[in-house]
Image: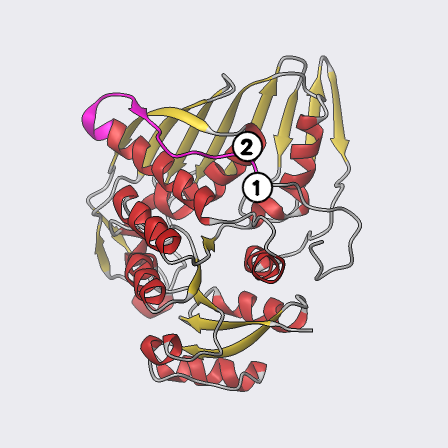
Amino acid sequence: MRKVRIGFVGVGNISGTYLKNLTTLFRDIEIAGVCDLIRERAETAAETYRIPKVYDDMYALFADPGVDIVLNITQAYNHYAVTKAALEHGKNVYSEKPLAPTFEQAKELFDLAQSRGLLLGGAPDTFMGAGIQSARRYIDAGLIGTPLGAEARMITHGPESWHPDPAAFYQPAAGPMLDMGPYYVTTLINLLGRVDRVAGMARASFPERVAGCEQRRGERIPVDVPTHVNGILSFENGAVAHLLTTFDVYHPQHSAVEIYGSEGTLFVPNPNNFSGEIQLRRGNEDAVLPLLYGYRENVRGLGLADMARGLLTGRERRADGVQQLHVVEVMTGILRASEEERTVKITTPFERRAPMAAGLPAGMLD
């Protein structure tokens, strides 16, 4: 059976999960080779996971006719340039989030892929896991009645206390909305559908941060992005949601997604995870609902495996460029609404992707 061959651009923090899952779990994929600006990282990955090639740079990877999909897991501020270069060299691309730091750049990438007949998609793929897929099934079955609204919160005091490269989180391609917002917006649109318009208020509460990790302890980090962002999302189906993403708040629980319906409320698992507890409150009764699907562990790469399956069979892909583009427009629309003190109309189309199939063995998608 033919396998889809993946080339890694970037072998940083998140690459270990991708490398493990793509070499042990998914049957339609094999890794053709890897490259990284720090060559030792690529060589270590190749040795650890028995990968046949270490490319000198990404252009050598793009020139390899044996690479079917480029996996772009560089730092966020490099996503646009790397994805554009890969597409220009005729490669399908799966990119970590966000697709690009601006809607204009994301639209350029989407249009470029379309014009060349290439596949474009990317993270997050956590919405394909057991938690969000089960929540969707309960909502679609009418368990909470008609969806009226939602509350989504990502609350933390920033990653500088632990992350080895915290400065990247305070550059224009990141901040709490563009860095963590993709998980929450992707979850909301897969539960409630297309966003029609947005409003927002945002601020940068502190002009700089201080690194706390061992490698950079005491280093002062300038803040160049809003770090406390409140968004209002109006959905095409009439539901209205509040989304808070912040790096400014001390709080015991940093994540929550609640879907409000005419007959009850569903408490959804952390969208940064593939699983978690689903709670239902209806009337005065509370219940914990069972998960109905597989993929409950950290299976990052699931969306890439789904893209590979789509490449082999021609079927619709779930974590595709249409979804990514809609998410980027929503997030940047919230930031623009804050800057311009107005509501922003969302222009991109979106329809919820096919639900995952239940009961299949691990590593299979259909």
129 w.r.t. 269: above or below = below
Residue 253 image offset from top left, x and y in percent: 52, 38
349 part of magenta stretch = yes
- Count up the numbered dots: 2
Residue at 55% across, 28% down: 192
Residue at 38% across, 48% down: 179
Q: Secondary structure at mark 1?
A: loop
Q: Which residue is mark 2?
A: 257
Which residues, given as a range, are shown in magenta? 338-352
73 w.r.t. 246: above or below = below
Q: Which residue is mark 1?
A: 270
Q: Are marks 2 and 1 in contact (CB under 8 Å)?
A: yes
- Could you tell me the amino acid type at mark 1? Asn
Q: Is residue 280 visible?
A: yes
Between the residue at mark 2 and the residue at mark 1, the CA separation in whole angstroms equals: 7 Å
Residue at 36% across, 49% down: 110
Q: Is residue 147 left or right of residue 240?
A: right
Residue 250 image offset from top left, x and y in percent: 41, 39
Residue 363 image offset from top left, x and y in percent: 70, 62
Structure colour scheme: secondary structure
Q: Is residue 288 left or right of residue 80?
A: right
What crowding class fits label 1: few (fewer than 14 Cα within 10 Å), some (14-19), or many (20 or more)? many
- Could you tell me the amino acid type at mark 2? Val
Q: Secondary structure at mark 2?
A: strand
Is the stretch drawn in magenta largely helix, strand or loop? loop
360 part of magenta stretch = no
Q: What label does residue 227 carry, if any?
A: none
235 or 150: nearer the viewer: 235
